Image (cartoon, grey):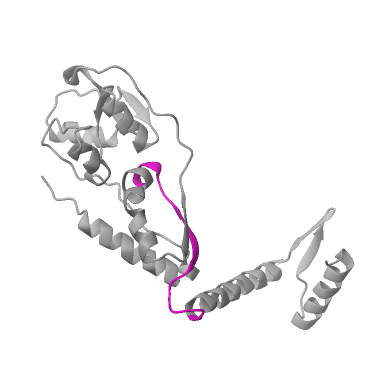
Amino acid sequence: HLTRSAVSHQLRLLERDLGFDLLERIGKGVALTPRGQRYASDVRKALTVLGDAVTRHAGTGVGGSFSVSCTPGFASLFLCTHIGEFRQMYPDVALRILTPRRLDDVSNAAADVLRANLLHLGDTEDWARWLALSKVENPDTEGGIFFSDMNLVFSAAIAGQGIAMGDELTSRRALSEGRLVRPFDIAISSPRSYFLVSEHAKAAHPVLEAFGRWLRSKLSENRVHPY
């Protein structure tokens, strides 16, 4: 247990050794000085390097914990269907998959495909590109239903509420099982992509490198072939 006076004493000693102030008083509180902020950033980087060194040299296997934050559609329709293989390969890795909060699934009676609503993910861009490629005259791209989650788009399509524009990577299983059908052969190349990103300071971490290799191999196995 450390008292407030003990912490203050240690800070004064550290400031004496460094030769500059770490904190400045603002109102009734305190904040890091500009030099204190830079010093804190350097200390965090050093601690990260030390933590990575412990992980690399603690044993021959890959271990540790990390979090993957991704869209609910990619998580549930692709990542969660393969993640068991990663756990078998790296049993000492504690993995947490995070997604934004999602809404309940949509359900309704079946609808006539020719009169169906357009189901949009976020905006009208994909449908506008597809309708232009299909040479549809005066298309109403603003109509239909807009969703923020690909799970909901697929749920609405499966329930017959409209026609969805989806990527084959996440819809392949539903197509193979017959829960979704491809009504048209025309396909577009969407400007949207999936990216694997991490903090620069942790990019070479053994756990992240192992996950990156595994994910790239699974995506290669499930490579989408143009129609």
Q: Is residue 189 above or below residue 202?
A: above
Query: Dividing the image into 4 quarters, which one contains the N terminus?
Result: bottom right
> What percent of the width, then of the height, locates residue 23?
77, 66
Q: Residue at x 36, y 28 (%)?
A: 146
Does the image show residue 122?
Answer: no
Instruction: Quadrant for residue 143, please give it.
Output: top left
Q: Residue at x 47, y 42 (%)?
A: 100
Does the image show residue 223?
Answer: yes
Please state which of residues 213 and 148 is positioned toward the viewer in this rendering.
Answer: 213
Q: Residue at x 77, y 80 (%)?
A: 19
Q: Is residue 159 above or below residue 212?
A: above
Q: Is residue 167 above or below residue 118?
A: below
Q: Residue at x 37, y 58 (%)?
A: 196
Tell me if 6 is positioned left or right of 82 in this view.
right
> What percent of the width, then of the height, locates residue 169?
25, 47
Instruction: Quadrant for residue 210, please give it.
Output: bottom left
Q: Is residue 142 above or below residue 6?
A: above
Please state which of residues 116 and 35 is positioned toward the viewer in this rendering.
Answer: 116
Q: Which residues are magenta?
A: 57-74
Is residue 208 magenta-colored?
no
